[in-house]
Image: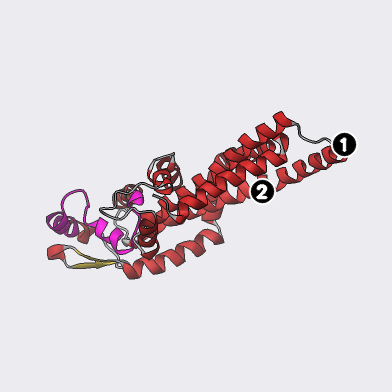
């Protein structure tokens, strides 16, 4: 069974192979090597740049934007204690009562805080990270007040800054490397060096690899979207035949549901 996303994926793979065949091995493989270098450099430098973003105006702007939205969405009914709002400050004397009431209402290990995560439609992949930060906040606040919106906002801000840092570094490497490759290609063009059959076959393989990488990024994006509980995720699940009870097989569904490293990448950015 096919859907239009499967057809698009197949078309991208075939087109990538064709373009690679026409361009030849050097042009195609040099592009792959440049992308690989960009990814490696971005991985090593993202943590450094993301901290700069986080401590600067970018991080402050993101935090304030996230906090305002998240604080307004949180409303947790903690049994006999009452209701906790997202921007409601919690102090040391209140914490024990909230803990007791929360465990009675939702179970042990601060499970009632997950209601706050559900309020803001936080992807479940973030739950563990926010829990860890929340525990550290509770253990180290030493009498200072805190709100439920704070740890959630911190995690989302950090993840966004990390993603922005990764894209910034990767883009910079691609631009600089692209300039170098363009100069080399101009030299080869001036020398009238046309690709032979072996070069074209290598280009075909390389072009197919690039197309597969694009499809992989699309499937990774699908996984990220479907972590959210919103209209976009519901629509995407329907298009990919991933709604409850739908057992049909499609190429796009198989690529999206098979874990080709998606969970590892998502966890990498969340942490």
Residue found at the very far right of the displayed protein: 190
Q: Nearer the viewer, residue 246 or 115?
A: 246
Residue 250 among magenta residues? no
The residue where tag 2 is placed is: 172
Residue 102: quadrant of the picture: bottom left
Left or right of 172 in this view: 220 = left
Q: What kind of element bears circle 2?
A: helix
Residue found at the very far top of the displayed protein: 198
Judge whether 186 appears above or below 74 on screen. above
Q: Nearer the viewer, mark 1 or mark 2?
A: 1
Left or right of 35 in this view: 131 = left
Residue 100 among magenta residues? yes
The quadrant the C terminus occupies is: top left
Decide whether the magenta segment is chiefly helix, strand or loop.
helix
Q: Where's residue 162, x and y in %? A: 51, 50
Q: Where's residue 172, x and y in %? A: 66, 48
Q: What kind of element bears circle 1?
A: loop
Q: Where's residue 96, x and y in %? A: 18, 56
Q: Nearer the viewer, residue 34 or 73?
A: 34
Question: What residue sits 25% from the left and 53% below the top?
Answer: 245
The residue where tag 1 is placed is: 191
Q: Which residues are magenta?
A: 97-126
């Amino acid at each position: 069974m096919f859907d239009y996303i499967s057809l698009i994926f197949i078309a991208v793979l075939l087109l990538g192979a064709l373009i690679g065949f026409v361009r030849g091995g050097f042009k195609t493989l040099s592009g792959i090597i440049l992308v690989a270098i960009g990814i490696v450099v971005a991985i090593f430098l993202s943590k450094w740049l993301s901290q700069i973003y986080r401590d600067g105006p970018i991080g402050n702007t993101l935090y304030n934007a996230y906090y305002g939205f998240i604080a307004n969405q949180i409303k947790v009914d903690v049994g006999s204690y009452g209701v906790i709002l997202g921007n409601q400050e919690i102090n040391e004397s209140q914490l024990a009562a909230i803990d007791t009431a929360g465990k009675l209402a939702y179970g042990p290990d601060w499970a009632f805080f997950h209601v706050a995560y559900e309020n803001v439609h936080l992807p479940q992949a973030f739950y563990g990270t926010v829990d860890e930060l929340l525990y550290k906040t509770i253990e180290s606040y030493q009498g200072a007040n805190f709100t439920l919106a704070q740890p959630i906002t911190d995690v989302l801000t950090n993840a966004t800054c990390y993603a922005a840092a990764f894209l910034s570094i990767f883009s910079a490497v691609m631009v600089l490397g692209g300039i170098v490759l363009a100069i080399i290609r101009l030299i080869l063009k001036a020398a009238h060096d046309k690709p032979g059959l072996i070069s074209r076959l290598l280009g075909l393989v390389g072009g197919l690899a690039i197309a597969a990488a694009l499809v992989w990024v699309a499937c990774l994006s699908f996984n990220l979207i479907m972590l959210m509980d919103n209209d976009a995720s519901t629509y995407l699940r329907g298009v990919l035949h991933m709604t409850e009870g739908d057992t049909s097989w499609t190429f796009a569904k198989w690529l999206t549901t098979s874990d080709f490293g998606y969970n590892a990448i998502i966890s990498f950015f969340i942490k």
